[in-house]
Amino acid sequence: MRAFRIVVAAHGDLADAFVSAARLIGGDIEDLQAVGLRPDDSPESFGERLAAACPDDRPLLILTDLVGGTPHNVALVVARGLPTATVISGVNLAVLVEAATCTDALDAGTVERLVALGRSALTDASSLAASRSP
Amino acid sequence: MRAFRIVVAAHGDLADAFVSAARLIGGDIEDLQAVGLRPDDSPESFGERLAAACPDDRPLLILTDLVGGTPHNVALVVARGLPTATVISGVNLAVLVEAATCTDALDAGTVERLVALGRSALTDASSLAASRSP
C-alpha cells in the first residue's frame, strides 16, 4: 500500500485524463484523485474542490500541470495549510505512474527521485532511437 | 507561424486533454493534433490513425506520453518513415505550450531547448515555494 495520497490538479480534462491513463497502464490505483479546472471555475471554487480532495489524514502528493497556471497556484495555497503535502509541477505520465506505484515514504529522497525520473522520461526519443540503431 | 506541425500521441483521452489544456492557455493553436490510443485499438489501428495525422509535407514534432507505451512505440515507427519528424517522450504541458508557441525551425537546438524547458518545469514546487518565502 502506498504511504501517501496523490491528487492531480490540472487545466480542463487533463487531470482526469492523467488518472485514466495511469489506470489504463497500472490497473486499479487507489488513493489517486483528479481535480480539473473548469472553464467556469474561479480560483476560489477550484480551491474549494481541491481542498476537499486533500484531507489532512495522510501525507499527500499534489501533481500540477504548469507553474504559473491556476491549478498550480491554488495547489500551493492548499498545500501551505497541510504540513505533509508536497507539490510537484510539470506532471507527466512517467512521474504519475512512478508515484502511483511507489511504496516508500513521501520524504525528500522520494520526491527527488520522482522528479529525476519524470525529467529523465522527458527526452528526445528520436536521437535515442537513432543511437540504438545498428 | 510555427515552422512545424505538432501531434500528441498518448493513452486514452490524455492526448485530447493535452491539446484542450494547451488551447485553454494559448488560445487557438493551429497545426496541433491529438491521437489517443483507445481501449479497443491494436498497435496497427492506432498506427494507421497516427500516420494519417502525420503528413510528410512539413517538419513534425510528435510528443508522446510514456517511453515503452504503445503510443510512443508506434510513434517511433511512424517517425522512422518521416525524414523530418522528431519524437519527444514524456510530454508535459510546459513542453507542449512551449512547442506550440515556438517560432524557430525544428532543428537539434530547438529540440534540446524544448526538452530542457520541459524538464525544468517538472520540479519540487514545495521546496521552491519554501525557498521563496520571506
Image (cartoon, coloured by chain):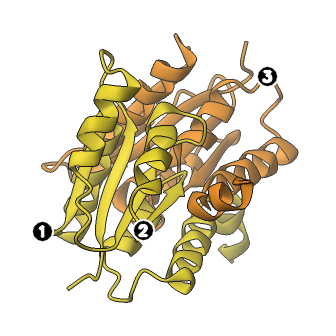
Chain colours: A orange, B yellow
- Badge 1: few (under 14), some or many (20 or more) residues near its Cα, within 10 Å? few
Marks 3 and 2 sit apart, C-alpha to C-alpha, by 43 Å
- Choose between A48 and B11: the one closer to the eye: B11
Question: Which of the chains bears the disc numbered 2?
Answer: B
Q: Is residue B124 visible?
A: no
- Quadrant assignment, res B41: top left
- Choose between B18 and A123: the one closer to the eye: A123
Question: Which of the chains bears the disc numbered 3?
Answer: A
Q: Residue at x 53, y 33 (%)?
A: B69
Marks 1 and 2 sit apart, C-alpha to C-alpha, by 28 Å
Q: Amino acid at mark 3?
A: Thr
Q: Is residue A60 visible?
A: yes
Q: Earlier in the sequence, mark 1 or mark 2?
A: 1
Residue tagged by mark 3?
A103
- Choose between A74 and B15: the one closer to the eye: B15
Q: Quadrant of the C terminus of chain A?
A: bottom right
Tell me the SS state at disc 2.
Answer: loop
In percent of width and height, residue A21 lies at 43, 29
Q: Residue at x 32, y 50 (%)?
A: B18
In percent of width and height, residue A49 lies at 33, 35
Tell me the SS state at disc 1.
Answer: loop
Q: Residue at x 57, y 31 (%)?
A: A6
Mark linked to residue B28? 1
Q: Residue at x 48, y 32 (%)?
A: B70
Mark linked to residue B83? 2
Question: Which of the chains bears the disc numbered 1?
Answer: B
Observer-side mark, 1 or 2, equals 2
**Residues tagged 3 and 2 counted as in contact (Cβ below 8 A):** no
- Quadrant assignment, res A50: top left
